Amino acid sequence: MPMIERWSKFIETVRNFFREKNYIEVSTPILRRYPNLDPNTEPVEVKLKNSKERFWLHTSPEYAMKKILSRYGKNIFQITKVFRNDAKGKLHSPEFTMLEWYKVPADYNYIINELKELLSLLGYNDFETITVEEAFERYADIILSEDEEIFKNNLITAGYEFDDKEDWETIFYRIYLEVERNLGKEKPTFLINFPKRLAILAKTNNNYAERFELYINGVEIANGWTEETDPEEVERRLKEEAEKRNLPLDKEFIEAHKNMPESAGCSVGLERLFMVKEGLSSIWDIDFLKL
């Protein structure tokens, strides 16, 4: 079967999975007046003719979908193109297809189980779950700590070198890039118990974020969490990110959290999932993808 037909059946399988679970499919604007403030993700700014306003292409439909969630309180999903100001690579494209969904009421454990159900339709039936701390010990021989001084001392003990000026997050992500290449080699692996400081917009509990990532064959496929519903906490986190990167803050998005139901959500890079399902080594082996 030609790859274009296999892709079509793949998308149909994903869409039907959520329709059969009575999720409502939504469509939201790709062009936004405010950028997503995702850590480590750069938005693409767009200048419109004869306009002094700033616009961005969304890096995910998260903000718009959560506004819908706040207004209607219904289970929703979307398959859409998203854009990130990234260089082209084996696993990266400035434009790609994202699946995103939100379940009411639910936590991240529910979403993990739902994602397993979806993956079973694609031929995956055996899974592993490990914590971020376990992954660092297993694949980097490092004991992780959120205390920067303790973390750096542990790195020195393990023989790692770093610049004294590097902060906790910079060092964490440098090592994490090496750790994640080992995840999901034998079976799809769910990584849980992210450090509290990496919560993004997830609820936190006992100094951990209720957040997970899914890896298959060393490739990050999905990112999900239990949604933080406190508008003051959401504003605190986003304001910090906006000021750090000199980007505007979407106050309407923060206001929406006043009516946000208890929920959980997840996003999946569909080209990556299709790539690993098909046994390809790069998203560019999907022969109809062109830039």
Image (cartoon, rainbow, N blue to C red):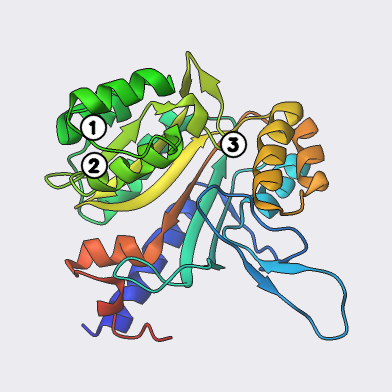
Look at the picture and state if 138 lies above or below 281: above
245 with respect to 249 (left or right): left
Query: Amino acid type of disc 2?
Result: Val
Residue 177 located left or right of residue 46: left
Could you tell me which residue is drawn at 33 percent across and 26 percent down? 152
The crowd level at tag 3 (other Cα within 10 Å; few <14, some 14-19, many 20+) is many
Q: Amino acid at mark 1?
A: Ala
Q: CA distance from mark 2 to mark 3?
A: 23 Å
Q: Residue furthest left?
A: 186
Which residue is at the far top? 206
Location of the C terminus by quadrant is bottom left
* Residue placed under numbered mark 2 in the picture: 179
Question: Residue 85, position in %: x, y?
Answer: 53, 68
State the residue position of label 1.
135
Q: Quadrant of residue 208?
A: top left
- Name the residue carrying label 3: 201
* Residue sitting at x 78%, y 63%: 33
User: Type of residue at label 3?
Assistant: Leu
Is there CB contact under 8 Å for labels 1 and 3?
Answer: no
Reading the chain from its start, which is encountered first: label 1 or label 2? 1
Name the N-terminal-most of marks 2 and 3.
2
- CA gap, disc 1 to disc 3? 22 Å
Residue 15 picture location, percent across and down: 46, 61
Q: Nearer the viewer, residue 270 or 36?
A: 36
Q: Secondary structure at mark 1?
A: helix
